[in-house]
Image (cartoon, rainbow, N blue to C red):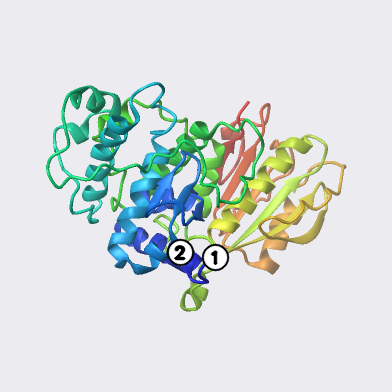
Amino acid sequence: MTPPDFGHLISGSRLRLRGKSAFFATLLLHAEFVPSREVAAAGTDGERVYVNPEVAASLPPDVLDGLLLHEVLHAALSHVERRGPREKKRWNKAADTIVNGMVAAAGLPIPPQAARDEHLEKLSVEEVYTALEGQESEEGEEDSDDLLDGPPSDAPPKGGKPGQNVARQWQQALAQARSVGAMSGGKGDDPLGAHRELARLSPARLDWRAQLWRFLARTPVDFGGFDRRFVGRGLYLEALDDESLTALVAVDTSGSVDDEAVRALVAEVQGVLGAYPHVKAILYYADTEAYGPFELRPGDAIPQPQGGGGTDFRPIFELSETHEPDVLVYLTDGYGDFPEQAPRMPTLWVVPPGGLEDEGFPFGDVLRLGE
């Protein structure tokens, strides 16, 4: 039986990491942590991170933070997937050399028996693996075995669709971490940028999903900076209720936006809501009228679209005077009647392929869905 505080341990670690680095905190947010008593302390199969709940509960907070970040970095850098036919023990040591250097750079403790090599830890794991050929472990140095060939037998079945590209998902997580880190005012701005291990990986293009997260991961107080409420899934802080952010999400249902784009946008907004508990969202469908409101919550079914007439953006902006949202996200091709005056709230136009050119929007930022 899982200790009831396992989720709080994970959420607390995410919160503490936020204070150190927006980059690292975002990576932890994307990780799925699963309790397992079959791992000595923690391990990863490249997709999920498995944590021994009793060990986690016994560790000092900073040691737990370092342990979780260690495993998340292994997963994010595809250390399990990249091993191939290489000898497992030496590969794990090479990967640990790099990750321990990154954890130390984050100001977190690494295992006392872990060896540091400031030259090797800046290389790629393949280069470190070659450099370690023929070397034996130093006295007192323990060999790690946290890169797992598969999930522990006591772990619940994995969700998601068969054949999902886990490496691609982690690349997108790294892209989002860079995006959120870059808007943190320099604090935690891609602290791994100097490492060849990241440079050798083809960085994922910062797609529209990452840009949407960047737009919504802000507060009404510091809309240009990193969200100070980066609290992780499921951790609610009563004291921060006054900094909650409300987003009005409008979807053009005049017939020019297809259902796939609607589902993709709404599902991504729901993902942001699950990650940022203090972000609230209200959904409207619109053609020449507004239909709603619908409350958006993580995991809920997407409300059935309504409308089908022409396109007039003004009813939604008139509604914004009633709801007083902090931001407005409008999915449309851009062909319609705009308000005469720009609204006070930041506006993000999400435009599918074939939509109006950027200069055609009289105000707001334009985000384009991928082809």
Q: Nearer the viewer, residue 60 or 232?
A: 60
Determine which of the numbered discs, if any, sits on residue 175 in the image: none
Disc 2 and disc 1: Cα gap in Å?
7 Å
Q: Nearer the viewer, residue 52 or 361?
A: 52
Q: Position of residue 11 (x, y in %)?
A: 45, 64
| Relative height, residue 355 to residue 254 (above, below) | above
Q: Position of residue 74 (x, y in %)?
A: 37, 40
Secondary structure type for disc 1: loop
**Residue 129 appears anywhere in the view:** yes
The type of residue carrying mark 1 is: Gly
Give the quadrant of the C terminus: top right
Q: Position of residue 135 (x, y in %)?
A: 16, 28
Q: Residue at x 40, y 27 (%)?
A: 82
Residue extending farthest to the bottom is 239
Label 1 neighbourhood size at 10 Å, few (<14), some (14-19), many (20+)? some
Q: Which residue is mark 2?
A: 11
Label 2 neighbourhood size at 10 Å, few (<14), some (14-19), many (20+)? many
Q: Which residue is mark 1?
A: 234
Q: Residue at x 52, y 43 (%)?
A: 151
The reply to whether dot 2 and dot 1 touch (C-beta < 8 Å) is yes
The type of residue carrying mark 2 is: Ser
Give the quadrant of the N terminus: bottom right
Q: Quadrant of residue 361?
A: top right
